[in-house]
Image (spheres, rainbow, N blue to C red):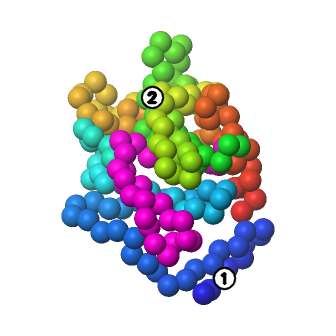
Amino acid sequence: MQEYRLGGCRLKLGKPQQVTEGVGHTWFPRLARFPGGELLLTHSLNADTEALLVNASSVHISHDNGGSWDLNYEVAYGASIKAIRPDGAIAGPVFRPYAVPGAPNRRQATTHYVAYEAAGTHYHMQPWGCRIEGLPRDLHLSRNEGKWSKDWPLGLALTLLANSPGCANLRQASRQLDRC
């Protein structure tokens, strides 16, 4: 096992292990650890395009530090930014922000909020549960605005922190991640 250190963070890399395989798309993996030690691995099942009519992610849970992945399921949306809530859930907003209906300017966006609770055995999605406010300039709309698709209507890569009750803990999590 090889270990890397950067500031206060430590990364250990061992022998790669195949968790899943599939026909079509199994990419954009994201890995997180629950406070109890369980691992949460999610990946996209979608084509890499802006004009999706559906959005799906695969979820895999390991209770033995990645030795096996005994809980697997698919969900409509997976969290793009994952933060640990005080109750131990891993949660965050999905990647596709939309304009806030009726907003006075294009400096506000909204997106769904996803939580993996009870060490990944429960999945919860709150439609439009995250709101992004106070952006420094107006967001531009995609070239497909008004067309039927699951397009990313705003030209915003969601690596921003949301300002809503559902996402308030992301600021603290971001400060913790910034130290790494």
Is residue 82 shown above or below 10?
Answer: above
**Residue found 31% across the figure and 28% down from its top:** 145
Identify which amino acid the numbered label 1 is placed on.
Glu
The residue under the point 55% across, 83% down is 14
Q: Picture coordinates of residue 76 (x, y %)? A: 35, 42
Residue 138: give its label: none
Q: Is residue 98 or residue 81 the one in the foreground?
A: 81
Q: Magenta segment range?
A: 57-85
Q: Earlier in the sequence, mark 1 or mark 2?
A: 1
Looking at the rendered image, the quarter that the C terminus falls into is bottom right
Which class describes the residues within 10 Å of circle 1: few (<14), some (14-19), or many (20+)? Answer: few
The image quarter containing residue 155 is top left
Say which of 52 and 92 sits in front.
92
The amino acid sitting under disc 2 is: Pro
Q: Position of residue 107 (x, y in %)?
A: 56, 25
The location of residue 36, given as percent across then percent down, is 65, 59
Would you say 119 lies left or right of 151 here?
right
Q: Is residue 8 above or below residue 99?
A: below
Whole-percent x and y of residue 58?
37, 54
Q: Residue at x 48, y 21 (%)?
A: 100
Residue position for label 2: 127
Q: Dot 2 lies on which element?
A: strand
**Res 135 visible:** no
- Mark 2 is surrounded, within 10 Å at the Cα level, by few (under 14), some (14 to 19) or many (20 or more) other residues, namely few
Residue ranking furthest to the right: 8
Confirm whether the magenta stretch covers residue 166. no
Left or right: where 27 falls relative to 11? left
Question: Residue 17 is drawn in which quadrant?
Answer: bottom left
Q: Is residue 172 visible?
A: yes
**Mark 1 — residue?**
3
